């Protein structure tokens, strides 16, 4: 009898995780924007500002930059620059839709304090 290895994809211990809901939302938004999944992806970053000191930056990009870390989730790629990765490693990107609001949710273990808007934090 032939033995079959079952490979279960896992995120790197100090990488990023993206939920299935977020992947589906990224995929549909990229198609709407006309961005090719083979070349482009979602860019996650951190910038100074916001009510808690740092804020998340999320947008689409047509290609990764030279020093980016590139994470692959099915057919969706996520780009993170080296400085932002310091604050984002171990983070989970989710997408939630409720009666009151819809949007991406950052679950970041590196955040020591965040504000009510959910897009600003300090570490």
Image (tube, grey):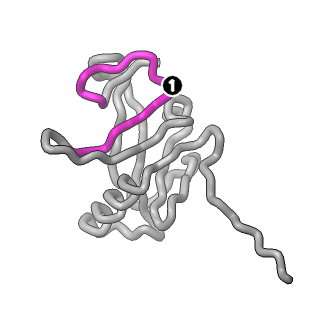
> How many labels, in total?
1
Give the vertical position of 70 relative to 35 (above or below): above
Q: Is residue 42 magenta?
A: no
Please name the residue that numbered disc 1 is placed on. 110
In the displayed structure, 66 sits above or below 117; it is below
Residue name at image x 50 percent, y 34 percent? 88
Percent of width and height locating residue 53: 36, 17
**In terms of depth relative to the viewer, which is nearer, 56 or 10?**
10
- Where disc 1 sits, the SS reads loop
Q: Position of residue 100 (x, y in %)?
A: 13, 39
Residue at 25% of width from left, 22% of height from top? Answer: 116
Q: Residue furthest front?
A: 1
Occupied quadrant, residue 13:
top right
Which span of residues is magenta-colored?
102-118
**Residue at the outermost left position:** 100
Q: Is 66 left, or right, of 107 in this rendering?
A: right
**Is 14 displayed left or right of 16 in the figure?**
right
Few, some or many residues within 10 Å of mark 1 (<14, 14–19, 20+): some
Q: Residue 3's x, y, as percent?
A: 82, 75
x, y percent for residue 75: 47, 67
Q: Who is closer to the viewer here, 4 or 21?
A: 4
- Left/right of residue 15 with respect to residue 93 in the rendered view: right
Left/right placement of residue 61 relative to residue 98 reads right
* Residue drawn at point x = 41 percent, y = 48 percent: 43
Please state, as top left, top right, bottom left or bottom right, where the N terminus lies in the image.
bottom right
């Amino acid at each position: 009898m032939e033995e079959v290895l079952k490979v279960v994809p896992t995120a790197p211990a100090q990488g990023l995780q993206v939920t299935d809901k977020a992947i589906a939302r990224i995929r549909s938004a990229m198609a709407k924007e006309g961005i090719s999944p083979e070349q482009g992806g979602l860019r996650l970053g951190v910038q100074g500002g916001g009510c808690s000191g740092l804020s998340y930056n999320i947008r689409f990009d047509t290609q990764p930059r030279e020093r980016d870390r590139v994470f692959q989730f099915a057919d969706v790629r996520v780009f993170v620059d080296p400085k932002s990765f310091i604050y984002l490693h171990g983070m989970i990107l989710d997408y939630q839709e409720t009666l009151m609001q819809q949007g991406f949710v950052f679950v970041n273990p590196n955040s020591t304090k965040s504000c009510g808007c959910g897009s600003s934090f300090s570490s």
